[in-house]
Amino acid sequence: MSIVSNQLETPPESGHPEGRLFIFSAPSGAGKSTLCMAARRHFPDMLYSISHTTRPPRDGETDGKDYHFITVEAFIQKIESNGWAEWAQVHGNYYGTSAEFIDAGIHAGKDILLDIDVQGTFKILKRYPDSVTVFIMPPSLDVLRQRLESRGTDRQDVIEIRMKNACHEMAEAHRYRHTIVNDNLETAVSELISLIERYHQNPHPSSSRRVS
Ligand code: ADP
Ligand code: 5GP
C-alpha cells in the first residue's frame, strides 16, 4: 500500500465526495499506454492502478512500475482470498486489479486511472457503478496492425491473437460512456485531458463519442 499512502496527502480534486475511477480500454496497440502516460503526466495527483499479471515482462518493462509481475500460483491464491477488484484472462494470461489499492484510494478521495480490458471494465462497473469508462479506438484495423508491428514488442503469433481479439473488443465500444479515436496523438491527448477536466468541473457531464 506504499503507493497509496505516498500519494494521499493532496486533497481530492474532483469535487466528488469519494475518489472516482477512470477506466480506459482499447484493443492492444491502439495507444492506450501512450495516452494513459500523457494523462498521468497532466494529472499528477491521480493515482494509477498498477495491474498484476502473469505475462512475462517485455523489454523495458519494470516490475512494480508497469505491472506487478507475479506467478500463476500467486494470482490464483489472490482469487481465492478475494483480493481482486476484478480479474480476467486476456490473450492467454491473467491480469488483475488489487481491491485493496482501489478501495484505499477512493476512500481517500483520490481519482484513479485504470488501464484494463473490456471484461474487467464490466466487472468493475458492477462494484463501482459511478466509474467513468473510456474506449480508445484505433483509426482502423490496418493502422492497429502497423502499430503492433512497429512497436516491436510482440512475436508475430502474439500479434495475430491480439488482432483477432481486437474485433471482439471494438464491438463492445458502444457500452463505454466515452470513445476517443487515437488517430492524431496530439488531438487524442487533448481530448482525453479535456474529458477528465470536465469531470473535475462537473461530476456528471454528458457522454461524448467521436468515431471516425
Ligand atoms: P497499447 O497500450 O494500447 O497496447 P501503445 O500505447 O503501446 O498501445 O501504442 C502502440 C504503438 O503505437 C506504440 O509504438 C506507440 O508509440 C504508437 N502510437 C500510439 N499512439 C499513436 C498515434 N496516435 N499515432 C501513431 N503511433 C501511435
Ligand atoms: P498488455 O499485455 O498489452 O500490457 O495488456 C493486454 C490487455 O490486458 C490490455 O487490454 C490491458 O488493458 C489489459 N489489462 C491490463 N491490466 C489489466 C487488469 O488488471 N485487468 C484486466 N481485466 N485487464 C487488464
Image (cartoon, rainbow, N blue to C red):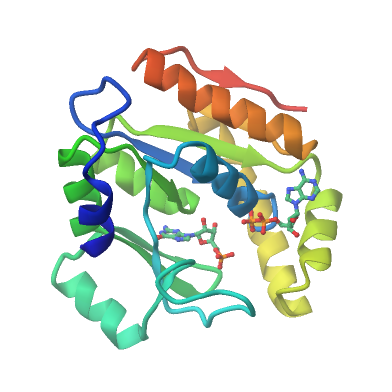
Residue at figure coordinates x 84%, y 50% from the top left: 143
Q: How many marks overall?
A: 0
Residue 91 occupies quadrant: bottom right
Residue at figure coordinates x 65%, y 28% from the top left: 190
Q: Is residue 209 left or right of residue 99?
A: right
Q: Nearer the viewer, residue 174 or 135?
A: 135
Q: Is residue 204 left or right of residue 77?
A: right
Quadrant containing the N terminus is bottom left
Residue 54 occupies quadrant: bottom left
Residue 137 vertical position relative to residue 177 in the rendered view, above or below: below
* Image coords of residue 61 (percent x, y): 56, 74
Residue at figure coordinates x 22%, y 45% from the top left: 8
Residue 95 occupies quadrant: bottom left
Residue 92 vertical position relative to residue 38 in the rendered view, above or below: below
Quadrant containing the C terminus is top right
Q: Is residue 118 left or right of residue 181?
A: left
Residue projecting furthest to the front: 9
Residue 183 vertical position relative to residue 164 in the rendered view, above or below: above
Residue at figure coordinates x 18%, y 48% from the top left: 103
* Image coords of residue 43 (percent x, y): 46, 37
* Image coords of residue 65 (percent x, y): 45, 67
Q: Nearer the viewer, residue 99 or 192?
A: 192
* Image coords of residue 35 (percent x, y): 61, 44
Q: Nearer the viewer, residue 42 or 153?
A: 42
